[in-house]
Amino acid sequence: MDELARFALVTLTAVLFIVDPIAVVPTYLVITQDETAEERRSTARRACFAMTLLLILFAATGTLLFRAFGITLPAFRTAGGLILWFVAMDMLRGERRTQEGRDEVIEGRAKEDVALTPLAIPMLAGPGAISTVIVLSSEALGAAHTAIVYGAIVVTGLVSFIALRLGEPLLGRLGKTGIRVVTRVMGLLLAAVAVQFVLSGVKEAFGL
């Protein structure tokens, strides 16, 4: 596997797994339970579009922002890896979004438009996802790598929309136990990506 293909695989895996749209499905169904089918479709579409736009924005400008604050790339890679690690550990323990989900459901029901908050932010595009795309964009060596990062975000947005649209049959087929199993598998792979981020940051920081 050449370097570009490896980067594409790691990038898509990291972005898709940290967003983890399958874990958002139960909350999405509860928040939109009083909406019509067309309204649900619209909510899912706007949430995924907002998430995609936000992550692309951070991927494009994130490195400039932390450079402005004097934060080095190795430091941010290491910090981003640690954030991913803790998220991955929550996923492996089956605690992904559990408490947050209850709070977001209550808040979401009180809002007229739940597409932006809580669905897009923070449930799809949370701190972990934002950190991930910034780290990945900082590792882009040229236009091709940058395009891969943006492409991975767009693909994740499409997959998220499909997951939300197929929420009811997906939840019915997998059940809550099945979703927890899928989330744990994603957590394991995400943990490996997190370790790679930390190792890359440490190696660059100490010139290893």
Image (cartoon, rainbow, N blue to C red):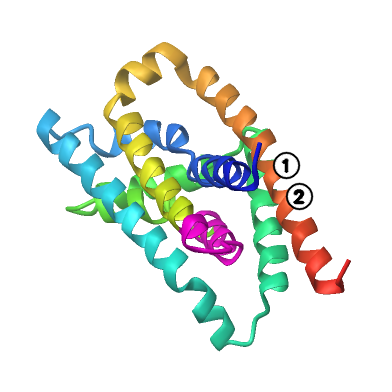
Q: Quadrant of residue 68?
A: bottom right
Pointers 2 and 1 in contact (C-beta within 8 Å)? yes
Q: Is residue 112 left or right of residue 70?
A: left
Residue 105's spot in the image, x, y percent?
A: 36, 44
Q: Is residue 140 visible?
A: yes
Residue 36's spot in the image, x, y percent?
A: 11, 31
Q: Is residue 117 visible?
A: no
Q: What main secondary structure does the magenta stretch of the protein show?
A: helix
Quarter holding the N terminus is top right
Please name the residue that numbered disc 1 is placed on: 192
Residue 139 within the magenta-colored segment of the rendering: yes
Up the image or down, 173 lies above or below 5; here it is above
> Which stretch did the figure color magenta?
128-146
Mark number for residue 173?
none
Amino acid under disc 1: Ala
* Residue at the limit of the structure toward the front, as seen here: 2
The residue drawn where x is 58% and y is 47% is: 4
Please name the residue that numbered disc 2 is placed on: 195
Quarter holding the C terminus is bottom right
The residue drawn where x is 57% and y is 58% is: 136
Closer-to-camera residue (9/123): 9
